[in-house]
């Protein structure tokens, strides 16, 4: 008997596949090893069921994407967890993630964690920054109950949403709140380094609403090196929206005359911190080096 399903976990060479008839544990056929291919969590696959209990994964359907290490395939949306404190909120870090996922053509929803641990002044400053991200088109939450309510309608049939964010930002804590039986480990934050240790060591999909949520260690550090520098401005969505009004096609928004981005920046309609991060990321890509806190 042949059936189809989604790989939800990989443990010691076994693939757990969610099928219309329930969860099936499988092994991959040797043909994958010969091709030097490896099925990934999130893959839509074909499984041959054996009445004696030996089930085999026989085909992987074409992926729409494959992101992270360890990887998740067919990611529909990223739920980006950015902490208010421990580790401290950083627009530069936020922009790194947003740029990376824009490059991957995956939409992002932002969740601010640990706001209850921050001072009122810190929260007010952070929310002013996050208001800008809402204005340019990102969905932003700072209340986990409101996020939970929204996700129940946002996650569509068989969509895979994956958590992303710096180590220690609270991804596993959020998943344990959203999915009480997830049982994900949570970790302490290093006060001296302002960062946490990886507590998630493998990728797993958890059924949620009509789709799945993934917690993965693969999105804690982001390498923007593969991005072509002339394309970087395309991944800052407010730049991309107005670049058609620049005098020159392919304007990089630096020294070019009659640049709409620079005009809006001078008028305060584009945030200075976003433009500064754009310049910093250009320099990083040119120099091909990761920031120290992400190494």
Image (spheres, rainbow, N blue to C red):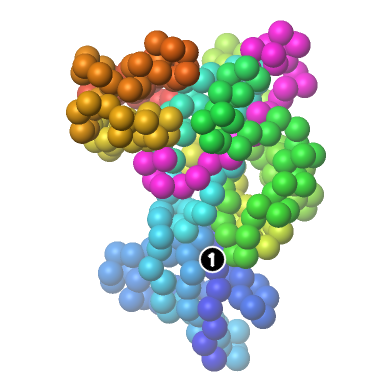
Tally the numbered discs. 1
List x then y, in percent, for residue 215: 60, 46
Left/right of residue 108 with respect to residue 119 in the rendered view? left
Magenta stretch: give its range: 102-126
* Residue extending farthest top: 121
List x then y, in percent, for residue 172: 66, 40
Relative vertical location of residue 138 with respect to residue 196 in this rendering, above or below: below
Left/right of residue 187 with respect to residue 107 in the rendered view? right
Q: Which structural element holds mark 1?
A: strand
Residue density around tag 1, few if under 14, some if 14–19, many if 20 or more, within 10 Å: many
Quadrant hosting residue 198 = top right
x 42%, y 40%: residue: 102
- Looking at the image, which is closer to me, 22 or 64? 64
The residue that mark 1 highlights is 7
List x then y, in percent, for residue 286: 22, 24
List x then y, in percent, for residue 244: 30, 34
x 49%, y 69%: residue: 44
Relative vertical location of residue 250 with respect to residue 58 in this rendering, above or below: above
- Looking at the image, which is closer to me, 47 or 106? 106
Is residue 1 among the parts visible in the rendering? yes
Quadrant hosting residue 241 = top left
Is residue 224 among the parts visible in the rendering? no
x 48%, y 42%: residue: 218
- From the image, which quarter does the N terminus lie in? bottom right
- From the image, which quarter does the C terminus lie in? top left
Residue 37 part of the magenta-drawn span: no
Residue 104 part of the magenta-drawn span: yes
x 46%, y 34%: residue: 98
């Amino acid at each position: 008997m042949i059936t189809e399903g989604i790989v939800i976990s990989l443990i010691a060479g076994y693939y757990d596949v969610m099928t219309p008839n329930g969860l099936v544990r499988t092994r991959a056929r040797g043909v994958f090893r010969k091709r030097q291919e490896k099925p990934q969590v999130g893959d839509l696959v074909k499984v041959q069921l054996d009445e004696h209990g030996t089930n085999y994964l026989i085909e992987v359907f074409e992926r729409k994407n494959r992101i992270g290490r360890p990887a998740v395939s067919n990611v529909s949306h990223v739920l980006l967890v950015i902490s208010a404190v421990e580790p401290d909120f950083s627009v530069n870090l936020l922009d790194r993630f947003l740029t990376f996922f824009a490059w991957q053509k995956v939409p992002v929803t932002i969740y601010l964690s640990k706001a209850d641990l921050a001072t009122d002044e810190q929260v007010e400053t952070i929310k002013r920054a996050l208001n800008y991200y809402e204005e340019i088109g990102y969905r932003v939450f700072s209340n986990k109950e409101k996020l939970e309510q929204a996700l129940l309608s946002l996650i569509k049939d068989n969509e895979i949403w994956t958590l992303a964010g710096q180590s220690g930002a609270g991804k596993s804590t959020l998943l344990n709140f959203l999915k009480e039986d997830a049982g994900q480990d949570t970790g302490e934050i290093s006060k001296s380094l302002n960062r946490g240790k990886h507590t998630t060591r493998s990728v797993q999909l958890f059924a949620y609403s009509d789709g799945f949520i993934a917690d993965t260690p693969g999105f804690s550090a982001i390498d923007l090196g593969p991005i072509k520098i002339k394309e970087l401005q395309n991944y800052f969505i407010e730049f991309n929206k107005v670049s058609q009004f620049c005098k020159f096609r392919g304007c990089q928004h630096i020294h070019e005359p009659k640049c709409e981005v620079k005009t809006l920046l001078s008028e305060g309609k584009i945030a200075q911190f976003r433009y500064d991060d754009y310049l910093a990321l250009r320099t990083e890509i040119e120099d091909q080096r990761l920031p120290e806190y992400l190494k």
